[in-house]
Amino acid sequence: MGVSRAGTMEVPWLGQSVLRREDLRLTTGRGRYVDDVTPEGCLHLAFARSPLAHGRLVAIDAEAAKAEEGVVAVFTAADLGALGKNAINPIVPGIAEAPFEALARESVTALGQPVAAVVATSAATARDAALLVEIDVEPLAMEAPGEGAVSTSQEVTSGDVASAFEAADKVVSVTVAHSLLAPTPLEPRATLATVADGELTVWCSTQTPYRIREDLARILGLPPERIRVIAPDVGGAFGGKASIYPEDVMVAFAARHLNAPVKWVSPRSDDFLAASHGRGATSTAEMAFSADGRARALKAELVFQQGSWMTYSAAVPPNNALRILPGPYAIDALDLSARAHMTHRAAVGIYRGAGRPEAAILLDRLMEEGARALDIDPVEIRRRNLISAAALPLDTATGARIDSGDFAQLLDAVEAEAGYGRLRAAQARRRAAGEVVGIGLCLYIEPCGQGWESAEAALCCNGRFRATTGASAQGQGRETTFAQIAADALGTNPDLIDIRHGDTSEAERGLGALASRSTAIGGSAMRLACDALRGKIVERAAALLQCAPERVVFRAGRVYADDETGASVTLADLAGNVLGPEGAPEDVAISTTEIYHAKGEAWASGCCLAMVAVDPDTGVLDVEKLVWIDDAGVVVNPLLAQGQMMGGLAQGLGEALLERLVYDDDGQLLTGSLMDYALPRAGDMPPVQIGKIETRSPSNALGAKGVGEAGCIGIPAAVFNAVADAVSPFGANDLQMPLTSEKLWRAIRQTPHVATSGNGR
């Protein structure tokens, strides 16, 4: 291999499908989750929760709970004093903030709201005693979703919408109702707090340990430097662990008050009840088309549920959905609005996709309906409306700046990969034979990667590298990808790099992992930190080897003078030369720190095609084929990227076909367990062909874009459009997710079968 730049060899670790280094530990039972950490003398906490969704708190009788053997303390709001408030991102102007109460004080605002906290010597004792707390609540009225107080509101107008609709040859309209969804990570929420020498240490199953530290400092009135937050192995999150919760505050408060370790692990039922939910939006829209299939104007109203309190990113879903519109399509006349309403339910926050699925399915439902109304092929009507690659970067009317992409190439790639013409011909033959089959598409764009992140890179005395990131991990393979990024920059092997994350004591600042930003922003920070470290190592090695810096090369744990001397030194000896004989093996000899601020926001994109068949006798749906091409910019590890896509696909299918949180009129949750809330199983996963194009993002140093949320964005829309296509001959036009077999059975039976057009539609 030749030398590509001073201090490195051409070791192209970016783009390599390296196996996940985390898997051996996690699959052999050596993972370390919050519940695996139990200090000596650890106490356990459980909550007595509100039995009603809204009411005046009349009385709390905790005497029976206090009398139970093993109970150490019972806390109510009266014991907490004045606490600070959790932070809420003011991403939307005029946001009406609604922070939580650690324990309900004068009223309860949601079913399952914590009212009292019981601390005992065992988890079982705490749970049993919590059941003895008597809570007297006087019921109060509840507003229906969409009728409560408005927490956020935004409007965007552009162009002459009225004239465009007046001149339109066809106007189509759709309503899309998204069910409330439970993020449902494998590991429910969990928190452990200890106190030593006035320092508070909190282990938390979280995506954002630095945010937890800041919120705890604000709420408890402590200096941030006296709080350490550790996110050990985290068993999934999907946005549901991106913010602090009342339970986290109570665990920390109890540990400080009792001067003892206190741990709380959420039962699955409590996560259904009181962890943040996702989606829940209802969107209505109209699109005006000219006879040639060009979309001339778009009107849309998006109404979101907010829940009874606001997570840090509560305003992100409506803001994202609004600013994505009109997606990959060149539509100049826009009349858009998005608002969110408070409800007497669990908080509604970010869930994998966070506003992106709402925008994507709304746009692509309109495109499908436009194609049907104008008798134009669905692929062709999209092609006629695309933003061209030459027009990017593009500043949109909604304030977004789409930095890169090639949407026509995505559409062409899916058309070719799927054999679209053959599929349509097969669909026509099968329909003629009495089968109920459909084909649907989705072409999506998504913002993914902006802001800042921290990284530190270091050479240790043992010759190994240590790379610390402010990003964290919840199963994405972060340690593997960041080791590849570091190894590529340092010209070494990933096996020589130790990745550290999730501990606020190891990196001064950080944001965490959310919004598909970790690789693009955290990876860019890591790349630059390692580039700077390489420069420092080259400078030291050149002095030691007595050669010019441009002659220094790395090879197999050594640095060489690429000259007639061929002199070399091991990285361990080089580090020892810096620190001297007093250096221990893991001591840092040379280090660099990077706080990286991205120049802009990366925008990923993709295209999905689904083919489905519906059993006319049972309504059972079979997703026969999925073809999916994604553009995630520079892909560090294709194997892990595909794993992220498959995970998002599973959750996207869940929303489209199965998942739905249901409350009755009194605010009682009817789907509070996995007996009632349906999740996709391995057998529900359809065959899928995955491919990619790669347009490098100019917005970050790595050129990467997000991929983790793409499956939740494109898959539901493609499957929905395929199902709508399948049942369209029966006149069914009022379907909503989840597309259960009962709904499809009824749709097929509502009208007689009618003839279809020549293109299978």
Image: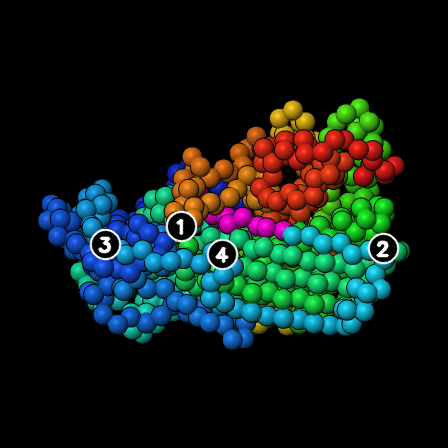
Viewer-proximal residue among 361 and 335: 335
Identified at 70% across, 72% down, the residue is: 157
Q: Secondary structure at mark 4?
A: loop
Provide the residue span drawn in magenta: 176-189
Name the amino acid, label 1.
Gly
In the rendered image, which residue does mark 2 sit on? 293
Q: Earlier in the sequence, mark 4 or mark 1?
A: 4
Image quadrant holding the N terminus, namely bottom right
In the rendered image, which residue does mark 3 sit on? 136
Task: Residue 667: give its label.
Answer: 1
Using a 10 Å C-alpha cutoff, classify the residue at mark 4 as few (fewer than 14 neighbours), some (14 to 19) or many (20 or more): many
Image quadrant holding the C terminus, namely top right
Residue 610: percent from left, percent from top:
71, 40
Say if mark 2 contacts mark 3, CB within 8 Å: no
Say if mark 2 contacts mark 1, CB within 8 Å: no
Residue 188 forms part of the magenta stretch: yes
Residue 101: percent from left, percent from top:
32, 64
Say if mark 2 contacts mark 4, CB within 8 Å: no
Name the amino acid, label 2.
Gly
